[in-house]
């Protein structure tokens, strides 16, 4: 049994991660300030004696009495809508939050895992994106606060590994979806599902031909767990390489929900990545990562959850 600190543990990915770690028999300390997460996401976990919740903003110094084996830093404002609204808080969670979490890992002699993002590649000029691509990011554009906070985070994680020999993993997560996503955080899958369930127009940005590659949450969590058990310090893409455009996504959601919604075309936000697909050769090689859940099946599960939680 190990003890994990999961920051951002009341969010979408963080709450699934806490649940899986508890299921595997570990102790979990979940830290969140609920800026985009919710108490509902962790309501059931609170009954588990191995689960503890700490209300705290990771941008401030973190003091914990217990021994910790692994610090997993997942706290961040993660959707374009929310990081445009809170650019300074986003930068602080990625920069100061990562620094504070690394200081804690050093003090506790713990391993460290960073939830980084495909956004470090920006609007990529290389396709699909491999870990050795340096990216194409506008630091002062609307996505700069998020992208640069994660790029700084990757850099300081690397510095702590090199200087203090902490075992670190940097996970570049590509678009992940599933139950417990916040219905109004503005990301495309919750937006379209909600719009379809209420027969409102689906808001497609631009011409809808831009692409993303969507990974179901269970596949991502399985990859993260395998990576925790992997001994070496590493940096790796995790996601599902099945690439589709946004219009194709509307078709699948309309079909599953049997909705009468029409499409409403809106302006494409500035600096949007036009294409995104992870090259997961490295993850396959080091942890035998193979996403199993096809988009249609994952959408069916997600829509079922959104219907119940409407
Ligand atoms: P989310 O918004 O559901 O979860 C983030 C959690 O972090 C929330 O519970 C929020 O309240 C918490 N948080 C934010 N700032 C905080 C702070 N200063 N102190 C304490 N808690 C704070 O988003 P998510 O999709 O679950 O994202 C989780 C992590 O994965 C993030 O680091 C995000 O950047 C990364 N990521 C997610 C995706 C994706 O597709 N979902 C893709 C790439 C990277
Ligand atoms: N998108 C859209 N309509 C929406 C929300 C998003 O067409 O209501 C598009 C957006 O332009 C982008 C893709 O869906 O191309 C994914 O957007 P999201 O905000 O989920 O994440 P991103 O990958 O851009 O960070």
Image (cartoon, rainbow, N blue to C red):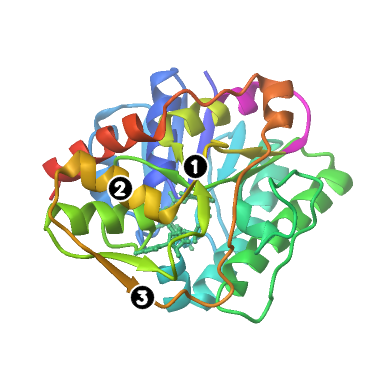
Q: Is residue 207 one of those drawn in magenta?
A: no
Where residue 166 sits in the image (x, y, percent)? 78, 39
Spatial CA distance of label 3 from label 2 is: 17 Å
Mark 1 and mark 3 lie on one chain; the one further toward the N terminus is: 1
The yes-or-no answer for disc 3 within 8 Å of ligand 2 is yes
User: Ligand 1: does it lie within 8 Å of the C-beta at label 1?
Assistant: no
The residue depicted at 50 percent of the width and 54 percent of the height is 75
Label 3: element kind: strand
10 Å crowding of disc 2: few (<14), some (14-19), many (20+): few
Pick whichever, 57 or 20, lies toward us: 20
Which disc, if any, is residue 48?
none
**Pointer 1: what residue?**
6
For label 2, the residue is: 251
Where in the figure is residue 114, as x and y percent of width and height? 63, 46
- From this view, report whether residue 42 is shown above or below residue 48: below
Looking at marks 3 and 2 on the same chain, the residue that comes earlier in the sequence is marked by: 2
In depth, the one of 100 and 146 nearer the eye is: 146
Stretch in magenta: 225-235
Residue that sits furthest to the bottom in the current view? 140
Q: Is residue 182 visible?
A: no
Per the image, the residue denoted by label 3 is 266
Q: Is residue 55 left or right of residue 184?
A: right
């Amino acid at each position: 049994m190990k003890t994990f600190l999961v920051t951002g543990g009341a969010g979408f990915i963080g709450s699934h991660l806490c649940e899986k770690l508890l299921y595997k028999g570990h102790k979990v300390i979940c830290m969140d300030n609920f800026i985009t997460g919710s108490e509902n996401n962790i309501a059931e976990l609170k009954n588990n004696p191995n689960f503890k919740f700490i209300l705290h903003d990771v941008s401030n110094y973190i003091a914990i009495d217990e021994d910790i084996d692994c610090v997993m830093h997942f706290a961040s404002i993660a959707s374009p809508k929310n990081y445009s609204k809170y650019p300074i808080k986003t930068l602080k969670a990625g920069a100061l939050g990562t620094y504070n979490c690394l200081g804690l890992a050093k003090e506790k002699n713990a391993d460290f895992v960073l939830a980084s993002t495909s956004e470090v590649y920006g609007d990529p000029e290389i396709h699909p994106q491999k870990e050795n691509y340096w990216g194409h990011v506008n630091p002062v554009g609307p996505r700069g606060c998020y992208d640069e906070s994660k790029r700084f985070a990757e850099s300081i994680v690397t510095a702590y590994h090199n200087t203090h020999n902490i075992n670190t993993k940097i996970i570049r997560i590509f678009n992940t979806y599933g139950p417990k996503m916040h219905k109004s955080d503005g990301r495309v899958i919750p937006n379209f599902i909600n719009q379809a369930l209420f027969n409102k127009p689906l808001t497609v940005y631009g011409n809808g031909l831009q692409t993303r590659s969507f990974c179901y949450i269970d596949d991502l969590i399985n990859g993260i767990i395998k990576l925790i058990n992997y001994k070496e310090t590493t940096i790796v893409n995790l996601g599902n390489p099945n690439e589709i455009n946004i219009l194709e996504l509307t078709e699948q959601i309309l079909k599953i929900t049997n909705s009468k919604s029409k499409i409403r075309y809106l302006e494409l936000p500035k600096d949007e990545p036009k294409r995104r697909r992870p090259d997961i050769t490295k993850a396959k090689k080091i942890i035998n990562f193979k996403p199993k859940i096809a988009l249609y099946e994952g959408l069916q599960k997600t829509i079922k959850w959104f219907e119940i939680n409407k």
